[in-house]
Amino acid sequence: MTKLLLSSQEYLAAFIKTAQYLAGLTTQQDIWSDLGQLLSSFFGADFVGFVEPLKDTGDIEPCRTFTGSLSAEELLNGEIREIIHDVLDSGFLAVKVITVPKPYSLVFLPLIQENKPRTVMLMGHETSDPVPKELLNVYLALAGLVSTTITRHSSEIELKKHRLHLEEIVTIRTKELSEANRELNHQIGERKRAFEALEEERRRLQQALDEVRTLRGIVPICAYCKKIRDDTGYWNQVEKYVSDHSDAKFSHGICPTCFEKEMKELKS
């Protein structure tokens, strides 16, 4: 059995060491196992345990770890379970001397998370003497420090989970956006090529249209001189009218019939 009551200076030193150690705990460490060994070492407890009710049944089970000379099977009888329930319900500490078969002086300390007792920390000394009030005050302060550490540790774990989840979402969303961007660029390229092809076809058709000029509708032509009347009412030679309204060009010659006619007129 370790010494039950240390000096005030020893308690202060142990408390400071505990605070320094707890401040450095990371999410990679087993906080419950480390806490058990730490409190047993610094405060001379013969065992340290952490228990909480099961979420489904509310029954008391050793949720974390038991460190020291007393096992959970030896400790958690019906009376002890009832005391643990009372501490969780009330939020106040409790003390109890038990014999299993050796005498142990137990302290039941509520650990607060989210403004509610969630876990009970058990500190035990192998003695039939009750725990001194001075040590109880130290344990109460220690419970507050442990509660703060557990809350911080749990928050960091949740934050890490959320961060990992967020990173996963960002990775998935980035992949989706990259794929969407590639598809959009592909569609833009397809539309650009289609537009260029359409523009080329329009240009080709316009060129063809520019090259093809045709005469349509009723053309007013004189039955005698064969002149054609234009839109302004002016009578034009056939070749001039056709040239103005199409791309046709004329080269002048004389047909055999006209040649013979003209020759007769010249001779006469």
Image (cartoon, helix red, strand yellow):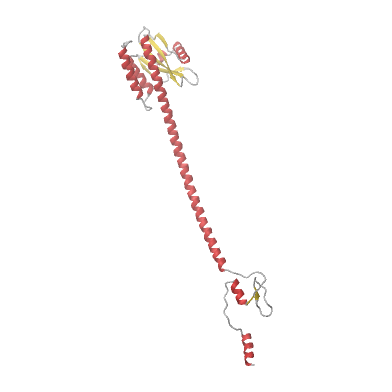
Residue at (54, 65) in percent of width and height: 207
Q: Position of residue 126 (x, y in %)?
A: 35, 10
> Quadrant location of residue 205?
bottom right
Residue at (56, 67) in percent of width and height: 210
Is 107 positioned to the left or the right of 188 in the image?
Answer: left
For the residue pair 57 and 125, the one nearer the viewer reads as 125
Residue 20 visible in the shown view: yes
| Total numbered labels placed on residues in the image | 0
Residue at (45, 10) in percent of width and height: 79
For the residue pair 137 and 101, the one nearer the viewer reads as 137
Work out whether 24 lies above or below 60. Answer: below
Work out whether 20 lies above or below 266. Answer: above
Residue 102 visible in the shown view: no
| Quadrant where the image shows the N terminus | top left
Residue at (43, 33) in percent of width and height: 164
Q: Which residue lies furthest to the right in this view?
A: 223
Work out whether 165 lies above or below 203. Answer: above
Q: Residue furthest bottom?
A: 268
Q: Where is residue 256 in the image (x, y as percent from the top left)?
A: 61, 85
> Quadrant location of residue 257?
bottom right
Q: Position of residue 192 (x, y in %)?
A: 50, 54
Q: Which residue lies furthest to the top in this view?
A: 129
| Quadrant where the image shows the C terminus | bottom right
